[in-house]
Amino acid sequence: MIRTVEETRSTNDDVLGLARGGAPEGLWLRAERQTGGRGRQGRDWQSPPGNLYASTLVRLRPNDPPAPTLAMVAAVALHEALGLSAPGQSFVIKWPNDILAGGAKLAGILLERADDAVVIGIGVNLAYHPEDLGRPVTSLAALAGASPEGGIFVEMLADTFARWLARWRSDGLEPVRTRWLAAAHPIGTAVSTPEGHGLFVGLD
């Protein structure tokens, strides 16, 4: 089920609230605009109209792979949806939560958990991208000359996510990991964590 609202503070906050109220897995909430969007480590996520701001809900089951690996499920699903939306463009997954195009950030993923509920927020620069972040940023429109409307893109994303989520549950993490590595930045790419900086050598 996909719901769309004109404006909200944060789709992740809303879906976390719905999860605590018993909302089922598979819910998607999309906002035309956010007033308090955030990225990883609480970073501000600019949310002008025309881009994708959406969150979905996964209910963890006893035999599921580790919950943090849902970040990989989201990344491969988003990578696939972007490829379907802009054939011929090259997109790269950057650990831990970004999608890049030509070295510029195009999309981000944020996971938050409450008990058995994992809320996955996804932001994609479809029509617009900020110019003053001090790092390369781009949009699908800048890359391809046009971009799908958010309501169309989220339907495509919901489909690819449902398929990869089902595979994560039925076949385990390995197929998701293999697909993630095939779409990820190359070995030797610089990466950083709150603990420090290093080079990407693989994914255990």
Image (cartoon, rainbow, N blue to C red):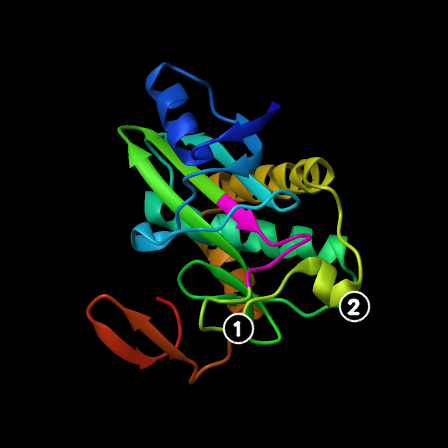
Q: In the rendered view, does 5 fall on the left or right side of 86?
A: left
Q: Where's the C terminus, which quadrant?
A: bottom left
Q: Residues within 10 Å of mark 1 (few under 14, many from 20)?
A: some
Q: Which residue is mark 1?
A: 136
Q: Which mark is residue 15?
A: none
Secondary structure under tag 2 reads loop
Which residue was labeled with disc 2?
88
Whether residue 66 is visible to the viewer of this picture, yes or no, is no
Q: Could you tell me the amino acid type at mark 2?
A: Gly
Q: Is residue 8 left or right of residue 127?
A: left
Q: Residue furthest left?
A: 195
Which residue shows up at 62% across the image and 75% down it?
102
Viewer-nearest of discs 2 and 1? 1
| The quadrant where residue 117 appears | top left
Q: Earlier in the sequence, mark 2 or mark 1?
A: 2
Question: In percent of the image, x 50 and y 79: which residue is there?
Answer: 186
Taking depth in this image into account, of 111 and 4 the one nearest to the observer is 4
Q: Looking at the picture, does residue 133 appear above or below residue 56? A: below
In the rendered image, the vertical position of residue 162 relative to residue 130, given as above or below: above
Q: Nearer the viewer, residue 136 or 122?
A: 136
Residue 125 among those drawn in magenta: yes
Horizontal and vertical percent position of residue 149: 74, 42
Q: Is residue 180 magenta?
A: no
Q: Quadrant of residue 190?
A: bottom left
Q: Residue at 29% across / 54% down in the picture?
A: 41
For residue 150, say whether it is visible.
yes
